[in-house]
Image (tube, helix red, strand yellow):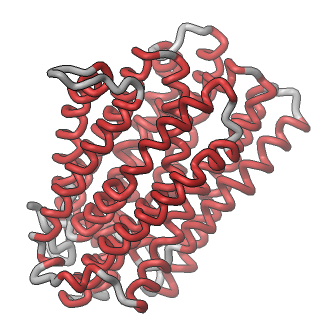
Amino acid sequence: MAERDLTHGALAGHLRKMAVPAALGMVFTTLYNVVDTYYAGWISTEAQAGLSVSFSAFMMMMAVGIGLNMGAGALIGGALGEKNPDKARALSAGAIGAAALLALVLMIAGILWGDGLLHLMRVGDEVFATASSYLGVMFFGLPAFMVGFTANGVLTAQGDTDTNKQAQMVACLVNIGLNPLLMFGALGLPGLGFHGIAVSTILIQCGVAVWLVTRALKTTAMQDVTLSQFLPGFSLTVELIKQSAPASLNMMVMMAGGFLIQTHLQPFGTAAVAGYGIAFRVEQLILLPILAISFATMPMVAQNFGAKNYDRVRQSVTLAWSAALSLSLIGAVALALGGVAMTRIFTDDPAAIASGAAYLQLAALMMPAYSLMFIITSFFQGVRRPIWSSAVGIYRQIFALALFPALFVAYTDWGLTAVWAGLFAAVWSGFVFAFFLTFMISRQTIGGMKLDFAGVREATA
């Protein structure tokens, strides 16, 4: 187990040892979803569409679990930096307990009102029944997902991203064999058809949750934990909500932004929508290493903020920005030069290829803004000001995405390019907003922000 005291030691070493396993974990999570989509295609195109739609609906509810992961991680990291093991223990156990209770509430709500969520998403009649059926099974897996996410937050706060990487790797490999076994039946077991994919996911995520909780219980943050500490008190619950709710809101805002983009693309036909969908997946794969750096930055900031080592907080952000920006420039070149080739991997429709490639060429110019915003979000979370991440998200994903594409479409004759130009304006204006907020919040929390390359070199030596 790779617990780390991030208040001491080489910053570059800490970042590398956390970011690499985090990136690999994200890769295997992505491959897990690809496997599900592949096997759904064995049944029908409608099954694939139903899987895609129900996954989006499920993630709306999973946003609560993702928020707990990030919020608990920031608070636990701060407590560890303060050298307050009692507080770290109470936060760790309380967060896991809160995740289990919230998951039960959301599971019941999903079972009762899941169809209403699909109606809200305007799911078409041709896939509604399939999506509803799949989602009805998946809701039973919410406790496993949310407890697993939160246990991973406990581990990440202590610098351990390797345990989750191992869990996701095994989960992906097991899913390859378990999916067809449950779908078609074997060894006297009846086939479950499309539901086999959902049951496979629930069983695997239960195993992942048990593994992550077991490992978390062995860490410093949960040493000598008692059963009663898994029932969080009122003050601890309020603290968790204040830190976690903005992160959950960010996830929901991101999904709302995706719906807005789809709305802007609808007038340009299905090829434009399909091209963007393909390009978005390509873009996300390129962004995975940068996301991993931001994921590793949060515990570095949180522990050193808790320890009141503000110079080291600044050095952590400087190092993360430098690494993320370097990777974003490499990614930008790949997107700019290989956009057409990357899009052709997924489709042979010329119109969809043209649409996706056009977006990827513009996305190349957005990569630096994305990378720096990811680090800013981790900084806000680490210094316990997550509400400002929500402010940036609401501006960029709601206000700017509603405004700029509509303006470009209305006042230019650029056609589909006007939508891409609007996305470009939304992303870069969002970065400018986030950049100025960083300096405002840093003055309030750590005495100001400056890029400290000399300090990074000293802390890396």
Total residue callouts = 0
Tell me what residue is drawn at x 57 percent, y 79 percent: 440
Tell me what residue is drawn at x 36 percent, y 65 percent: 69
Specify whether residue 147 is in view: yes
- 409, 190: nearer the viewer: 190
Name the spot of residue 203 as percent of width and height, x first.
26, 43
Residue 432: name its quadrant.
bottom right
- 55, 278: nearer the viewer: 55
Tell me what residue is drawn at x 52 percent, y 13 percent: 347
Q: Is residue 122 left or right of residue 79?
A: right
Q: Quadrant of the N terminus?
A: bottom left
Q: Quadrant of the C terminus?
A: bottom left
Residue 213: name its quadrant.
bottom left
Residue 87: name its quadrant.
bottom left
- 264, 81: nearer the viewer: 264
Residue 388 vs 179, above or below: the answer is below
Residue 78 vs 62, above or below: the answer is below
- 121, 21: nearer the viewer: 121
Name the spot of residue 93 as percent of width and height, x first.
25, 77
Residue 353 vs 292, above or below: the answer is above
Tell me what residue is drawn at x 68 percent, y 61 percent: 395
Specify whether residue 81 is in view: no
